Amino acid sequence: MSGDTIFTALTEEHGGDARWAFGTGFTDALAGVDTTLPAGVDGGDLALYCQMLGDDALVQAQRLVEWVTDAPELEEEVALANIALDLLGQARLLLARAGQADGTGRDEDAFAYRRGPTEFRNVHLAEAPRGDFARAVVTLLALSSSRLALFARLTDSKDPVLAAIAAKAVNELAYHREYAVSWTLRLGDGTPYSRERTAEAVAAVWPLTGELFATHSVEARLAGQGVGVDPATVRDEVHAVLARVLVEATLDAPAPFPESATAGRDGRHTELLAPLLDELQKVAREHPEATW
Amino acid sequence: MSTVTAQETPPGADLEHQAEFDAKVAADQRIEPRDWMPEAYRRTLVRQVSQHAHSEIIGMQPEGDWIASAPSLRRKAILLAKVQDEAGHGLYLYAAAETLGVDRADLTERLIEGRQKYSSIFNYPSLTFADVGVIGWLVDGAAICNQVPLCRSSFGPYSRAMVRICKEESFHQRQGYELLMRMMEGTEGQRRMVQDAVDRWWWPSLMMFGPPDAESPNTRQSMAWRIKRDTNDDLRQKFVDMSVPQAEKLGVTLPDPELAWNGERGHYDFGEPDWVEFKQVVSGAGPKNAERVARRRAAHEKGAWVREAATAYARKHQSAEEATV
């Protein structure tokens, strides 16, 4: 390899050449996918639904990024960054779809940077504090298991864009779940101390799991049209997965998921979301006219 | 130059090995981990490769601080991918160091106890988002300038790690430069941010090549061993020559009044970096030395119970497997 080539390449024109960053979702995952709205589907509903799924991913990614330079081992830095990157990629596609669906043409950044906390539609578990590594693992286990179950069904969505996004995401989510499972087993069945930390993490996460399966009216309507998935329909399947993992990890068999009403899906959040968004949005808001 | 060999004359039986080693190095062949090598060569490489690994890991911090606040989702994804690459580079390099008979856990201890150094550039703060671009352009640019010749290092595992790392670093540099181009086309405030970041990072970038040749006692030996292929001053000159036209294209001013084309030499003349500051930062008194190491140490210590759990789990399941065999 010649060093000169690298340096001269820098000031050459690259046109549409986007090869300069790997893994950042530059290749259009939706190339060739029909973006017109399916007949009979309310654009406003679809936009809200995409925000729900997109905000879950964006807010969870933002929390996961807190582990970068702070993980127990370099391999975990790489893995958690990778998971965050996947979720960020999903969020970008979903938020862009929201802007198409509601007819405003807003782009992904308009949704990420120019909405306040009450306009975010993520579940509370996504914004919950990162806690220790056990808490991060159990949170990831719950979120990736429920999201995988939803997205596996969304691959059949009548909205071709949602179906394409889901088809890309299921492989990613299967890896996220596998990662969370492998660490739940190690921590649960590791040392007495790690077992205790993991049991505490389960106790902290469990009250927030009910909301993952609470049905919002938008979800119910879109599920009826074959576009969305009612999260209540994956409740038992996800519980069975988590129960198997926790028991295998020598932890107590979990209680049923608590009954819960929707909260984050309606824009009602804990006090933790506003500071998370302040950090996410601060540079963009300081320079409203800027392009990046 | 190729007539210079190990400074320590080996006794009796090692003479033959030494001659073989010297011949291989002189013929630009690779020394592999199982090959005989002079102890001083091994020691120097362990130091060089582990310091390089530490630099990748500590180098995640100044940019990592901006992932959460990156002003667009595209920039956030790029930066996250970049910082993730750096952790990956650290991993390959620790693996390359381990082929020399050292243990990664021990190298990590040496880093967090401040017994081994890393590139002093990472002891400067990253104050605005423009720093992300300038770190990519200048700091990664200087790193590439240093590292591309190391793809021909005489030590096989290091040279192979460098090939992969240099490819990724060149993407990193381009993303930095592309961010700066975009910012320079933006608002007046963005242009000021870029110039300010260039002003702060230019001199530390020049210092990345190490002290002047006259004060770099190890250079001659390392070049003889072909674990270093160019002198500090030659690399620094190459970097300046490459960076000036890039700065012009970008529309920023490099903060050196002595910078001027010298037609006779066919190179840019440039001013002397502040070597007093360099020595201070290298010896631990830079603006961020204590914080960078403390953060790595805190992560390592906080994570001890997690690593212990993984070890305990592996041991249990290994003995369970053995019991069933």
Image (tube, rainbow, N blue to C red):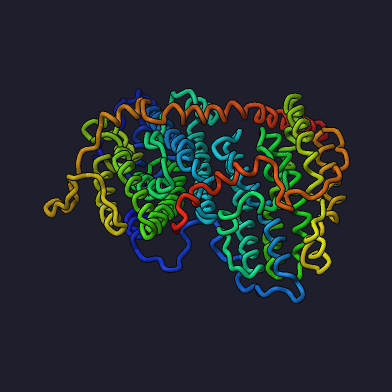
Q: Position of residue B229 (x, y in %)?
A: 31, 43
Task: Note whether residue A253 is visible.
Answer: yes
Q: Position of residue A248 (x, y in %)?
A: 82, 37
Count of marks, rendered view: 0
Residue closer to the observer: A140 or A52: A52
Rendered position, B180 above or below B121: below
At x 67% / y 61%, what residue is drawn?
A: A168
Q: Which quadrant of the structure image shows residue B131? A: top left
Rendered position, B85 above or below B315: below
- In the picture, measured across the screen, residue A20 lies left or right of residue A205, that is left
Q: Position of residue A267 (x, y in %)?
A: 70, 51
Query: Quadrant location of the C terminus of chain B?
Result: top right
Q: Position of residue A152 (x, y in %)?
A: 77, 59
Task: Note whether residue B229 is visible.
Answer: no
Rendered position, B118 above or below B168: above
Residue closer to the observer: B218 or B119: B119
Residue closer to the observer: A124 or B159: A124
Query: Quadrant location of the N terminus of chain B?
Result: top left
- In the picture, measured across the screen, residue B324 lies left or right of residue B230, that is right
Residue closer to the observer: A203 or B146: A203
At x 35% / y 23%, what residue is drawn?
A: B11
- In the picture, measured across the screen, residue B110 lies left or right of residue B278, that is right
Q: Which quadrant of the structure image shows residue B209? A: top left
Rendered position, B59 above or below B101: below
